Structure formats: C-alpha cells, structure tokens
Amino acid sequence: MGVGGGATRVRMMALAALLAMAASCPARSGDGEKAAAPTPAPKATPAPRTAAPKQVRIGYFANVTHAQALLGVDSGDFAKAVAPSTLVARTFNAGPSLIESLFAGEIDIGYIGPSPAVNAFVQSRGKGIRVIAGAAANGVVVVARPGSGIRTLADLKGKRLATPQLGNTQDISARHYLETVLMQTGADGVMPIANAEQAAMMSRGRIDAAWAVEPWASRLVAEAGGVVVAEEKELWPDRLFPLTLVVATPEFLEQHRDVVERLLVAHTSWTKRLAERPREHVASIAGALEKLGGKGLSEDLLTAALSRVVFTSEPMPSEIATFATWASDLGLARSVPDVGLLVDTRCLERARASSTHHAGAVESAGAASPEAP
C-alpha cells in the first residue's frame, strides 16, 4: 500500500478512537445547565426516562392552603399541563393517608405538610419521596376560648391545647413551644383533635385553645367565639415558615421530569396569581370546595383565612430542617434527615425559567405589534 493509503488508514484509526472515547463519556442532559456536583442517591442508577404516562395522579386536601391544586384542577389548567396524559385528581383528609397512597404507587404527586414529608423520607430511608416545590406558608393561628384566661402565648402553659393530629406540623410546633420556650415539663395538655371537631369542643369548654391551621382557625372565631391570641409566624425569625409542600416519588420525578416541569409551570402560575390578588379568587376557591363536597364556607370567612396565608413556591429547606429537628427532639421522629437529599428543586427552577421566557416572549410580541388605527 502507498503512502496515501497509509495516511488514510491512520486517519481512520484516529477517527475510530475518537468515536470510542465519545461513546464512553456520559451524555449531557441537553437542557443547557452545567453539570451539578454528584449527590448520594437511594439507588445505584437513576431510573430511565420513559414515554409519557397514561395518567398523572395527584393528591391534595380540600383546603384553602392547597389552593393551587384546588384551582389548578377545577380550572382544567393542570389537565392541560400534563396532556396528552390524563390527570387523575384525588382528595385526602389527612397527611398519613396521602403518604400511604404515595408509597403504594396510587398517586404520583401530592400536596402535603412539612412534617408528613419529613416522616415519609425517614420511614422510606430516603427512597420514597422528594419535595419539588413549596405551595403555602404561615396560615397557623393560636385561638383561645373566651374565658380561658389566655391572652398571650405565655398563658398556654398548663392549658388544654388542641392540635389537629399527633405528630403533624402544628402539633410539633405547639409541643416545641410549650416544652422549649415555656419550659413546660411534658406536653400532657396537648390534645390531638380533628380540625372539624375543635369548634364544638371549644364551645363546650373541653379545650382552652387550639393551635389551628386556616380556615379552621377562622372557623373557631366565627363558630365558637374564639379569640385570636397570635399567629405562629411571630415565632419564626423571618416571620415565614412552610405550611404546604409539593412532593413526588423519586421514580416519577426521574422518569417523567418533563411532565413534572409542565405541571409546576401551572402550579407557579397559580401561586403568583394567589400571592398577588388572593381576594379575586375567593369565589373560585369556594366553588371548588363546594364541588368536592365540603361544607360551604362563606366568602367572608375565606377572605379572613386567606389573609393569613402566604402563597409561595419556595420550599424553604432550612425551615423544613428546623421542623425535622424539633420532631426528633420531641421523640416524634427516629432521626433528623439530610434535607438536602429530600428537597429537589431542579424541575421548579426549569419551570420558573420557562414561565419567565414565555412571559418575556409575550411582552416582546405585544411591544412589536402595531397599534390599532
């Protein structure tokens, strides 16, 4: 073979070597982000991406603190976001039942409080749940029975204090305050009582106060003559703490990240509208609640409840870690998890970027359009 043929063979061998090297390199995601530092994962390898799911199953509460889900489902915005998949919405009455359905593979995405999310993460050894966004903050009020003698938070010491459920987010906050701030020995006076039963218990004098979430706090005022003592936000350094989070299973998050991102675009859109003009959506929330078979709430009561809720897509990981520490200190959790592994905001960040890009494109198009004659 001549010199030209040898050179050709050398070039072919070099090209083959380059192709082999390229094949051995990990593929980039193609989303334009820089490669992130590796973090420990529950599984050795991530689940592969698959085709769009036939259904996207979402769980939430029929409650104003889950307003994005209420309005996103009722308006059809969530269904449009996950199309061509079919949206299947399911309501729950308590966090543990929603977590059970999440673990059983009956729902893919849910709206839940910080404490159930942390407990689920610990129970599943980090394998069963991820926090993908925030939904609501604050919205927790200490309401006292008239004649109870409770005028300040300090007066709660030694009183009969209702919380919605043992180990839920409000229960942990109440117990922490009594034992750590008021230095009360034990929390025997804390009584886990379902939200729907607290007004009757207060009217009969069976409880002195309630550490209540909205709209139940406003209902205690309207139906039992309760007196607002304080809002829990007053106990937090920045007067802000997470109330409702959006969670997903790690498998669904890895296999259908694009679907999750589209749903979070709709979620953040509703979050923005609720944060900026909550009063405009009172009638829609009331209508959505009524469709779900809940007790009709007056628009005045809903307005009062919404005035204490902050709608935000920020998951607030440091505050979630605080709840986790309190639960562990109280003996209500086996350990304090690594919240850095629990919270995964990659889809949220891309959803926000997508929303910003879309809004900018619409604004540019409007500016470029000629004025009507």
Image: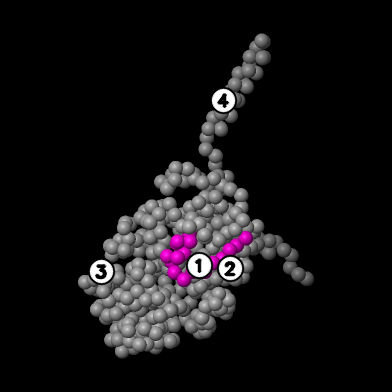
Please indicate whether residue 337 sits to the left or right of residue 97 in the image: left
Q: Which of the pair 47/306 is nearer the observer?
A: 47
Q: How far apart in space, not on screen, are marks 4 and 3 (Cα)?
A: 66 Å
Q: Are marks 2 and 4 in contact (CB under 8 Å)?
A: no
| The magenta stretch spans residue 95 | yes
User: Which badge, 3 or 2, is on the more N-terminal residue?
Assistant: 2
Q: Which residue position is annotated with label 2?
A: 73
- In the rendering, at what x and y percent does residue 368 appear? 70, 61
Identify the image quadrant of the C terminus: bottom right
Q: Are marks 1 and 2 in contact (CB under 8 Å)?
A: yes
Q: Nearer the viewer, mark 3 or mark 2?
A: 2
Please indicate whether residue 25 sits to the left or right of residue 95 in the image: right
**What is the three-letter code of the residue carrying label 3?**
Thr
Q: Which quadrant of the figure has residue 263?
A: bottom right
Q: Nearer the viewer, mark 4 or mark 3?
A: 3
- In the rendering, at what x and y percent does residue 117 appear? 42, 61
User: Which badge, 2 or 4, is on the more N-terminal residue?
Assistant: 4
Q: How far apart in space, not on screen, are marks 3 and 1 (Cα)?
A: 32 Å
Query: How many other residues sit within 10 Å of disc 4, few (<14), some (14-19) or many (≥20)?
Result: few
Q: How far apart in space, not on screen, are marks 1 and 4 (Cα)?
A: 54 Å
Q: How far apart in space, not on screen, are marks 2 and 4 (Cα)?
A: 53 Å
Q: Which residue position is annotated with label 4?
A: 17
Q: Which residues are magenta?
A: 86-102
Secondary element under disc 3, as helix, strand or loop, is helix
User: Which badge, 1 or 4, is on the more N-terminal residue?
Assistant: 4
| The magenta stretch spans residue 73 | no
Residue 60: assigned label: 1
Identified at 50% across, 51% down, the residue is 251
User: Which badge, 1 or 2, is on the more N-terminal residue?
Assistant: 1
Q: Which residue position is annotated with label 3?
A: 180
Secondary element under disc 1, as helix, strand or loop, is strand
Q: Which of the pair 362/29 is nearer the observer?
A: 29
